[in-house]
Image (cartoon, grey):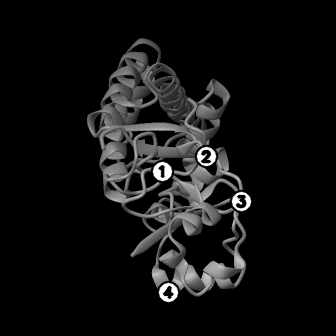
Amino acid sequence: MQWYYAINGERKGPVNQAEFERLVQSGVITPNSLVWRKPMADWQSLADVLAADPAAVAPVAPIFPSLPDTFVDACHVPLLDSDLPEGVMLYAGFWRRFAARLIDTVILWFAGQLIIGVVGALFFGETIKMLEKLRGHQPTPEQAIAMLGFIGTAVGISLILGVVYDCFFLRKYSATPGKLALGLTICRRDGSPLSVGRIVGRYFALGLNTFTLGLSYLVVAFDDEKRGVHDYVCDTRVVRTER
């Protein structure tokens, strides 16, 4: 028997029966705590569960008094099971998120190369010719400055393109093309869409993955809600649109 429980609006679990009873006995799960297990249709307070089925947590059932019914918005207590009631979130796993990010990276790389190539041809034609001739040779200070100008422009184009890409697709579809292709969306913990400011912040928070050589992204594989460090920073969730 697998149990899920919620603490301060955060979904925890699954835990087995023995662990669940230990959490109840230790006071981590209280009579007011919202819990769920199959085949329950919706989340209920532990007190309500015990009122309907005193044997559900036999060792502690006698100590809980009856409490009023508790309401919970399922979007605030998401789970990871395709059999869950309608309205709950299904978090995207590591490999699905990785594949979506790979698709977006390829799209952005090709778009960036095209734009940088056009801008380079229009404004840095002489610099590009100079770079071709410099292979294996030390540039002069003037040539180095020209090279840095072109490289800085290319980096700036890549950053702006990435921000515009995320802002357009996340505001319009709550998902980038890569995530749309794999049935994913990005939202807040309560299911609401991201603001422009949060989208921009999340884009730059993704840079942490570069500085940590991808280690901060691996957190997705171990987090209960499949969040990366950038999701923690910006309070976002990547969820599956299909059940």
Alpha carbon of mark 2 to alpha carbon of mark 3: how far? 15 Å
Query: Which one is earlier in the sequence, the residue at label 1 or at label 3?
Result: 1
Alpha carbon of mark 4 to alpha carbon of mark 2: how far? 25 Å
In the image, what residue type sits under mark 1? Asp
Alpha carbon of mark 4 to alpha carbon of mark 3: how far? 24 Å
Residue 34 visible from this viewpoint? no
Q: Are marks 4 and 3 in contact (CB under 8 Å)?
A: no
In the image, what residue type sits under mark 4? Ala
State the residue at coordinates (61%, 46%).
Answer: 72
Count all numbered tags in the image, as a single digit.
4
Q: Which residue is mark 1?
A: 42
Residue neighbourhood size for the residue with mark 3, other residues' Cα within 10 Å, grouped as few (<14), some (14–19), many (≥20): few
Front one among 209 and 182? 182
Q: Are marks 1 and 3 in contact (CB under 8 Å)?
A: no
Q: Are marks 2 and 1 in contact (CB under 8 Å)?
A: yes
Estimate the x, y position of residue 101 in percent, counting from the top left: 37, 44
Above-or-below relation of 234 to 163: below
Alpha carbon of mark 2 to alpha carbon of mark 1: how far? 9 Å
